[in-house]
Amino acid sequence: VYINKKFCDIFGLSEEELIGKSDYDFFPKEQADIFWEKDEMVFADGKENENIELLTDSKGLIRTIATKKTLLQDTEGNKLLVGTIHDITEISQLRKHEQQISNVLKELALGGTLDHVLKMILVIAEEEFPGMIASILLVDKEGKRLRSAVESRLPAFFLKAIEGTPIRDAMGSCGTAAFRRETIIVEDVQSHPFWQGVKEHTIKAGLFACWSEPIMATNGNVVGTFALYYSKPKKPSEQELKLMQTMAQVAAITIENQRSKNEGLMLGKLLESIIDSMPSVLIGVDSKIRVTQWNLQAEKQTFIPRTSAIGQPLETVYPSLAKDNDELHEAIQSQKIIANLKKTHHLAKENVYENITIYPLHARGMEGAVIRIDDITESVRLEETMIHSDKMTSIGVLA
């Protein structure tokens, strides 16, 4: 009985063609039955009905829509169903895209190999735009040429032809993108000057468009290229450009992560050396207050080696901290730093004064805390001596 202009635009029909018609006039009976079943539910119980559905618009594009059906009554008591449609195609695609990238990063965090993770990136890109072929090339050790990084769907003879592409201007889409450090769009490789050197190979491979995005490391260096190939001349849409840029960024994270792994042992030893060189006792614990880190100063303080302390309950290897368990749990749960200044405990029949600071940790799904303990016994005693000296001076002056 009523439709607005936007509804007409979606279906490509006029108001006159739609008024007085039902779902059965536009959709297959099976689909119309589903729509009408939901309508009847609203008419029967008066409850709103919300759904996420797929709809083919007037251009033949499949859209993701959110529908809401509400029951109203007019002044004469007639029941009317009011339906609203929101096009959430872009939001739906974005969420799917984010989930796919999340899966890639999860695989990377779980130790996936460079080859496996880069293949995942290619698959995601090709699923997003069927008929397109994605490719990743990496800069060689000398930083002068591009090499195949991962198996792609490009023909073997074409890959052989572009293997070792020089990073120079006008050297195909990828060589130019790496050289200029910017996106290179070639809508028709057959006529473009960048591709004349391998024109016969592109014809044989059935490749007619190629866009390339440089893969940039965090230090600003180009480490590779991410390219999209099409079987016909094509100008990129905004969505395709965004996909290419996003995939290049994810590839950069993957490549840097792999290189970081190769340097991991060296960095780990360096970090361990830095921690051990600190004059403070540093103890790492997990959410169950079990030791995960034990520096050299902690060994000296307790005479317990690191290998024996790791994995043990904190109260077992550092009994004086047993009474701080509640504060440790509080710091981990609240994610707030807790500082206990000038705490006292007895060691070898003497009072020992310490500053204890608890730093909560929350990274990579792991919770815990780092405990820093600074021995301030000497400074406290010096302070007490100075106070006593001041008192004696005051008494002398008074006498």
Image (cartoon, grey):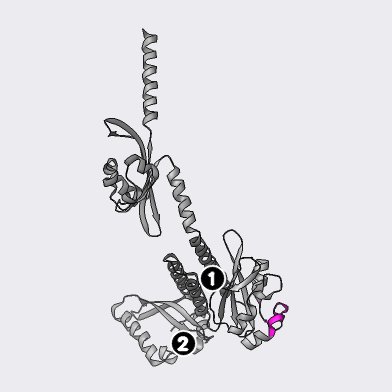
Q: Is residue 341 among what the camera can see?
A: no
Residue lying at 49% horizontally and 77% vertically, measured from the top left: 123
State the image coordinates of residue 92 (x, y, percent, origin top left). 46, 74
- Bin the neighbour count of mark 2 within 10 Å (Cα to Cα): few under 14, some 14-19, many 20 and up: few
State the image coordinates of residue 287 (x, y, percent, origin top left). 32, 53
- Bin the neighbour count of mark 1 within 10 Å (Cα to Cα): few under 14, some 14-19, many 20 and up: many
Q: Which residues are magenta?
A: 186-199
Question: According to the image, label 2 marks what residue?
Answer: 19
SS at mark 1 in the image: helix
Decide whether residue 194 is among the magenta residues. Answer: yes
Q: Which image quadrant for residue 23?
A: bottom left
In the displayed structure, 368 sits above or below 348; it is: below
Discs 1/2, front: 1
State the image coordinates of residue 195 (x, y, percent, origin top left). 69, 79
Question: According to the image, label 1 marks what residue?
Answer: 247
Q: Is residue 312 among what the camera can see?
A: yes
In the displayed structure, 199 sits above or below 48; it is: below
Decide whether residue 214 is among the magenta residues. Answer: no
Q: Which image quadrant for residue 70?
A: bottom left
Cα separation between marks 1 and 2: 46 Å
In the displayed structure, 232 sits above or below 328; it is: below
Q: Amino acid at mark 1?
A: Met
